[in-house]
Amino acid sequence: MDIGIVAQQLFNGLMLGVIYSMIAVGFSLFFGVLDVIKFSHGDVVTLGSFSALGAAGVSGALFALPPALALLTGLAAAVGAGALAGIVIGRILVIPLRGAPSINVLLATLMAGTVLREAIRLGVPNGGNPKPFPALLPSGMINAGSFSVGIDSVIIVCAGLLLVVGTHLFVTRTRFGLSIRAVAQDDEVARLAGIDQQRVVLGTFALGSGLAAFAGCMLGLYYREISFNMGVLLGIIGFASAVVGGLGSLIGPIIGGFLFAGVQTLVVVAMPISSAYRDVVAFAVIIILIALFPTGIIAEQRSERV
């Protein structure tokens, strides 16, 4: 097998791993602070991609911004819209239902995701059809033998890795991150210590949702096309990655995301003619791993949450 083609597939796997990790971390943050599963998370990915598309397109058309500024505008719009959606869902749906059975929160956020998805489909002109995403990153290719990768893809991977590392440092090294960890470990003790629990919960929802929206923008830049239902499968993959990695921890979902992408890549490399089955194989592997590690590869310990 050509080593250059294998290296290219590994790079593609790294790209997907970064994106899956960013989505999975959100699931784990939500579960860590409130023990809830926010099933609208995948649709926040879609919201981020469409917000970036709209902001970049409008700012580019009205002010003739250069691609770099249009990209920054799109990223700001994506993260802002995602964080706002997270705060709204957390404040209106999740916090009021905190004392209710967990299935109620799951169902409410699932319906919220459906509302968000349909709002995008109906609110965007011809929203039911895939939308082209503008090329806002530098073009050009890096070639080494049969290995070939776009400069834009390298930038996306580096930005994603920096964001994942930055999120880890934010949660583990900052005062607000310490508050998140305190609430995750024992909310009553955190309240007695003077921590504003609602502020921490809403901040956590903003952080996790902003990450997902950023991932949506990255997907648009990578595939150059977005659709209103792209978040459905991505949400399931992100949730599966969080569960198999260790729901409630911070490192576990990152490992889970790269693991899922790694299995997909192996299927493509080992069975090129069967690459359409990469999701089938990946989910089958996830099922086996969940059976082997019921609490996740990084087993959650209450005292070490998030």
Image (tube, rainbow, N blue to C red):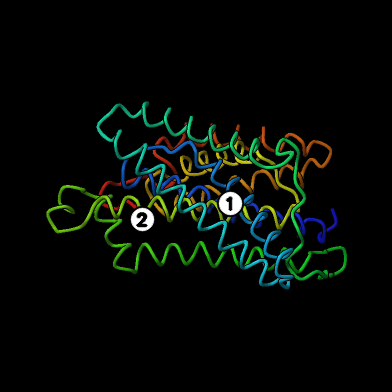
Place of residue 10 in the rendered image (x, y in percent of width and height, measured from the top left): 71, 56
Place of residue 261 in the rendered image (x, y in percent of width and height, measured from the top left): 63, 48
| Relative side of 102 to 153, left or right | left
Can residue 208 be seen from the camera position used here? yes
Query: How many angstroms separate mark 2 from mark 1 (CA)?
Result: 18 Å
Number of residues whose C-alpha sits closer than 10 Å to that of mark 2, classed few (under 14), some (14–19) or many (20 or more)? some
Give the secondary structure at mark 2.
helix
Q: Amino acid at mark 2?
A: Gly
Along the line of sight, which residue is nearer the eye, 228 or 223?
A: 228
| Relative side of 90 to 264, left or right | left
Q: Residue at x 34, y 69 (%)?
A: 173
Q: Residue at x 29, y 54 (%)?
A: 199
Q: Amino acid at mark 1?
A: Gly
Q: Is residue 80 above or below residue 41?
A: below
Q: Earlier in the sequence, mark 2 or mark 1?
A: 1
Q: Which mark is residue 48?
A: 1
Along the line of sight, which residue is nearer the eye, 94 or 180?
A: 94
